[in-house]
Image (cartoon, rainbow, N blue to C red):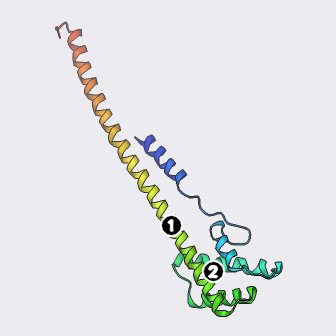
């Protein structure tokens, strides 16, 4: 029973999305796309400024995603940085931050939902396997008892 349950749990772990790997810039692979989309511009970017702001914005987004929302000071700061870096107006930068955070939050919710569904499927499979293992053990015990009774009678010379 434990081996089947362990195998089922291992299968569920393989089916669930892997934890996001940490990148050298402080972000994670899962939110890097969203952070990159914040900094899109028609102007070429300065690599020095990019190297210092992207990890900070990634950390702000990660904190916001954990809590479920960006705090007002964080949202204003990110909007100001995006406006300065991309040349967008303050309103457009704020809209971009809101849209991007909403998309990142939806993606995180989707991953959480899929993970829960995979865990539920693994739980159901383990329950099903445990039930049939129990039934097979009962059948085996009954068969062994019958065989022992027949064997004992044959040993004692009683006709079966």
Label 1: how many Cα within 10 Å (few below 14, some 14–19, many 20+)? few
Please determine whether, in this image, residue 150 is positioned above or below residue 19. above
Task: Determine whether, in the image, residue 110 is placed left or right of residue 41.
Answer: left
Expressed as whole percent of the image width and height from the top left, the position of residue 26 reads 70, 72
Depth check: give the residue in front, 148 or 49. 49
Q: Quadrant of the N terminus?
A: top left
User: On the picture, is 13 further left or further right than 147?
Assistant: right
**Of label 1 and label 2, which has the lower sequence position?**
2
Residue at the spot of label 1: 110
Q: Is residue 128 positioned above or below 21 on the image?
A: above
Task: Tell me: residue 128, above or below residue 99.
Answer: above
What residue is drawn where x is 41% and y is 56%? 120
Q: Quadrant of the C terminus?
A: top left
Which residue appears farthest toward the bottom when viewing the image?
90
Residue 130 vs residue 41: left or right? Answer: left
Q: CA distance from mark 1 to mark 2?
A: 20 Å
In the rendered structure, the answer to whether residue 56 lies left or right of residue 146 reads: right
Q: Secondary structure at mark 2?
A: helix
């Amino acid at each position: 029973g434990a081996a089947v349950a362990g195998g089922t749990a291992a299968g569920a772990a393989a089916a669930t999305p892997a934890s996001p790997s940490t990148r050298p810039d402080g972000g994670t692979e899962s939110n890097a796309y969203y952070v990159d989309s914040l900094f899109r511009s028609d102007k070429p970017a300065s690599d020095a400024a990019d190297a210092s702001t992207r990890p900070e914005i990634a950390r702000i987004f990660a904190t916001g995603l954990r809590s479920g929302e960006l705090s007002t000071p964080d949202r204003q700061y990110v909007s100001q940085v995006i406006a300065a870096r991309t040349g967008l107006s303050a309103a457009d930068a704020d809209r971009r931050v809101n849209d991007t955070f909403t998309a990142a939050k939806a993606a995180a919710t989707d991953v959480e939902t899929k993970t829960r569904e995979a865990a539920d499927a693994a739980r159901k499979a383990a329950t099903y396997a445990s039930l049939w293992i129990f039934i097979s053990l009962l059948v085996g015990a009954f068969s062994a008892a019958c065989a022992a009774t027949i064997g004992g009678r044959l040993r004692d010379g009683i006709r079966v």
